[in-house]
Image: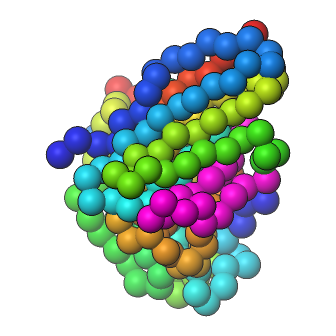
Amino acid sequence: DAKTTQPPSMDCAEGRAANLPCNHSTISGNEYVYWYRQIHSQGPQYIIHGLKNNETNEMASLIITEDRKSSTLILPHATLRDTAVYYCIVDPLGSQGNLIFGKGTKLSVKP
Amino acid sequence: EAGVTQSPTHLIKTRGQQATLRCSPISGHTSVYWYQQALGLGLQFLLWYDEGEERNRGNFPPRFSGRQFPNYSSELNVNALELEDSALYLCASSFEGYGANVLTFGAGSRLTVL
């Protein structure tokens, strides 16, 4: 079973920031938070990951709460091409490839 | 740089037949992972290969098998096909091998079992 809880769906207006929440209240100290997304009928795409500090890359920002029990993925300026299912995954290093994707959040970016 | 490539894109088989799916990882990546995504279900981990060895296996029956070749490409074999094997099969690769959770996925091979 997935160790994370995400809302099943969210809407966002094009050009606005998309903030996708993820609850991982049972996260262990050695577990990282990973975000992937899957655009319809394509393979998942890695977005970002972090342990305890906030992270930013060219795609998104990841904000992890101080107690690490939840996190938020931020797409700063959502476009129609960001419409996808977003998966939040917690996993330790050394998990041997067995990522548990769960059901994710279906983000719909609307014009 | 070429991404993870999978072939064939689509494959149609009948029950009881065997299917072979192929995957070429990104150049320099030594680990290959296989996932199954059946309709209405999430991604399920199948197999992980690294340096030619099977390192981990998901909760799938033995008729799901595979191998990794010296050039790090991989193939997934599904024997005695059943209707519920119809799914998108995704291959991913990574550089770090052990402990790597940053995977690059291919576009997948869609298997239909009639």
Q: Which residue is at the front of the view, B44 or A33?
A: B44
In the figure, is residue B45 to the left or right of A17? right
Looking at the image, is B70 positioned above or below residue B3? below
The residue at the point 62 percent across, 12 percent down is: B12
Looking at the image, is A83 positioned above or below residue A24? above
Q: List x then y, in percent, for residue B44.
A: 68, 47
* Quadrant assignment, res B11: top right
In the figure, is residue A10 to the left or right of B106? right
The residue at the point 72 percent across, 66 percent down is: A3
In the figure, is residue B38 to the left or right of A68? right
Q: Is residue B53 magenta?
A: yes
Give the residues drawn in magenta, as a range: B40-59
Q: Which residue is at the front of the view, A66 or B20?
A: B20
Q: List x then y, in percent, for residue A59.
A: 29, 55
Kindly give the residue lying farthest to the front in the view shown.
B70
The residue at the point 69 percent across, 24 percent down is: B18
Kindly give the residue lying farthest to the left in the view shown.
B1
Q: List x then y, in percent, for residue B30.
A: 38, 61
Looking at the image, is B73 positioned above or below residue A79? below
The residue at the point 73 percent across, 37 percent down is: B41
